[in-house]
Amino acid sequence: MSITQKAVFRGAGDLEERLRPLLRRVRRPGRYVGGEFNLRLKPAAEPLVVLSYPDVYEIGISNPALQILYSHVNDRTAAVAERAYCPWPDMASLMRDADLPLWTLESGRPVREAQVWGFTLPHELTFTNVLEMLDLAGVPIMAADRREDDPVVVAGGPAVAHPLSLSPFVDAFFAGEVEPWVDRLVAAAACGRRTDRIAALADVPGVWVPGRGEGPVPRQVHTAFSTCTPVTRPLVPVLEAVHDRAVIEVMRGCSAGCRFCQAGMWYRPVRELPVATVVAAAEDLLRETGCDEVSLVSLSSCDYSGVVEAVTAIRELRPGVRVSLPSLRVDSAAVKLAALGARQRGSVTLAPEAATEPLRATINKHVDDTQLEEATSAVFRGGYTGLKLYFMIGLPGETDADATHIASVAAATARQAREIAGGRARVSVSVSTFVPKAATPFAAEPFVGTETVRRRQQMVRDAWPRGVRLSTHDVGTSLVEAVLARGGVEAAVLVREAWHRGARFDGWSEHFSLEVWQAAARSIGMDLEEAARTEPAASPIDPLLDEAFLSREQERAAAGVRTQDCRTSACTSCGVCAGPIRMDLRPTGTTQSIGRGL
Amino acid sequence: MSDPGSGAPKSERVLLTFARGGPGRYLSHLDTVRALQRTFARAGLDLALSAGMRPKPRLAVGLPLPVGAAAVAELAVADVVAGCAGDDDRDAKENGARTGRWQASLHAAGPPGIEVLDVEPCSPGVRLQPRLAVYRWSLGVPEDATAAAVRSFVGESSVPIERNGPKGSRVVDLRTSIDAFEVRGTAHGCELWFGVRHEAHGAARPSEVLEEVMRRNVIAGSDAGTAPDADLTRCGVVYAGLAARGLAQEWLERHGSKTQQAG
Ligand code: SF4
């Protein structure tokens, strides 16, 4: 037998061979060569759309928005979509030394040859990575400096709710859910000259081109979500990734109305897939991915009307298939977990967010202590061995006592867990820091400040029970996130300055440096703490939420009054539902559509 | 290597020959195992599951490959659930048409960096015990310089190196681990071929061999020590009781006298 000459090692073209001297010298070289199952290759197709997630490969490969766009562009349009993720600093420095511009994982061609380069922005701590990727690709970081042969840089994702701190670096922003407009965006990419491409993009609903147009741009809603098929031929990494399972988005939107939650407000209204669609998709996914676990994802999968039916039916597809629900609401977890039966393992995550009843009322979290107890009991009686609880520090109206009570809840939960499951029960707690975000009732709340957060974190630590794992977030990252989430163009200057000074991968504790950001802020005459407290700059994006609703929610928060879930009680007039935009619940796999927003 | 155990009821053991290259070079051993398990699932061939609390698909890859190495013909054993592909008829089983079909569907279902070359039935007791692995480093170093360095290496009675691991350090003698060397000139430099014996007390790693050979390279100068363009391929492996795979057969024919224990 001789060395195979077949075109097997299809995918990377000669990319891997060209990169080999670099790949030998970096951590996890597989990040840079593609090679996934279901990789699409359309070498002759045009235009080239490059899709990027501004973080490391292992995080970006699982991003559902990228998977949706990748499938849609490659399978349903004449264009070709290829990908690039943010090179880890070891690779970035070798690329600069070798003068090698950022390449796509499919054909290995330079990213700067793309007609459109799309980024999905999950949160503000990825902004310096956007600049890093532009620079590594040889594309000028300032949109104003780009030349005719540079790609049009487009950004989408939830961070677009307040895009100002990235606006000088991006040619066009897309606000909202992209599915209805992919074909229009691709058509714009095919418009010859760069200036024509930008002009064509500006005509697509949901697109904001900095410096153009009047009035806020309304975010787009995928009104046909419930009648569409989910991605069933996703890219499946051969490297171990963060999520190693097949994923179905069973529901979009959340109606719980948590006042701090950007995703909960941004993806309204709730739309569900019929159970039959979910089960059929699961069957295709199991075959296409070779996974034995299907994860039913959404902002709150236990609220999905067909959750029990779907889980039962998917389990019956094939022996050994596991189904997971990654996000459970405390108030409905107990019932749903019980319904799922006792074939469970691993751990469950619940997010009470606040430890005391009054604070939960302020943030509109529909959870009481009894429900948390019931959920804990359901978790450990259901066979799980781990429970992870999420809390936040720095919420509006929070007192020191509210924060320290997190330790008491942790102790009580751990005690209860041990009573049920004995020594194998594990409880862990993550305490993050609240960052006010655009398009929420708390958008204008000041960031509580690093000093208060540090003091409360210490109070929690001092009161912490033995045997429960506690993790807290670096408050410096929250401070920066808060500045970028509310800032105007001066925040963009800060991003550029911080990047120039070496800020990268700010969401990673091993890379984040508050000193770098502070120095960058000082150099432009900014005080980070003050910038995180000031009134947010007006966003050019309309999140579709009524101003009246937002101010009503602020008043109710101050008064400690909860607002009901519009799915289970009356519409609370948030303003999102109008015309074709309506809540779409599919309780029994029928085509029932419930619009109550008018 | 994780052993899939002896054949379970209602499953049959097959030997799988695969190559890896391109993006597949950068898979760890566990990544490779997982990618092959996934390839079976995608091809509609169910793997039998191990017993225990966390059942795992029964597929074992013979000898781990170093990250970065291509491979010509690697072996894995897998236990396929009988009848899962719906073609359990006796004729097809006997004339090999069935495993041929399996190979075709596995080939189609594999990821870009892994190619399933062959599937053959084997007895349920087959285990993969490596005896000899044949490696090839492609080097941008002149043939003469490499050949001289190899002569110097071979002239020594032992080439001990210290390996540091989680359980402390230990000394491995590269010299006794090497079966034979060949140096072949190429347009860009040369290829350094060698066989590594796998015995109970451990085997030389290809990177260690290259480093020790290049350390003895006095002609090529200081650059050679790092061999920056070095590129590794495993060309074949000999397993106890099984026919040699890949280019290992030709290697055995040339160097057979020194590798009798390999057969
Ligand atoms: S308009 Fe009413 S029904 Fe629609 S999402 Fe808002 S509160 Fe819910």
Image: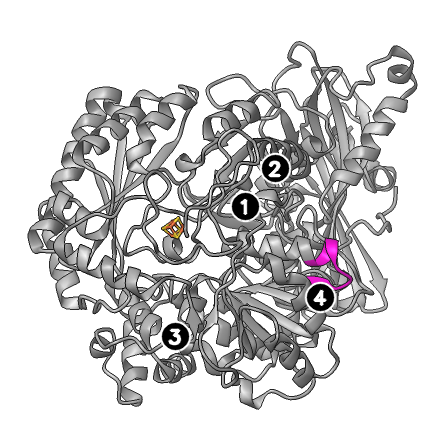
Which residue corresponds to mark 2? B34
Chain of the residue on which disc 1 is drawn: A
Q: Position of residue A227 (x, y in %)?
A: 61, 43
Instruction: Report if the CB atoms under discs 4 and 3 are less than 8 Å apart.
Output: no
Q: Which residue is mark 1?
A: A240
Position of the N terminus of chain B by quadrant: top right
- Closer to the camera in the image, A106 or A528: A528
Residue A349 lies within the magenta run = no
The residue marked by circle 4 belongs to what chain? A
Of the numbered discs 4 and 3, the one sitting upstream in the chain is 4
Q: Quadrant of residue A326?
A: top left
Q: Residue furthest left?
A: A401
Which residue is disc 3 drawn over?
A539
Comes first in the chain, label 1 or label 4:
4
Q: Residues within 10 Å of mark 2 (few under 14, many from 20)?
A: many
Label pair 1/2, CB-CB below 8 angstroms: yes
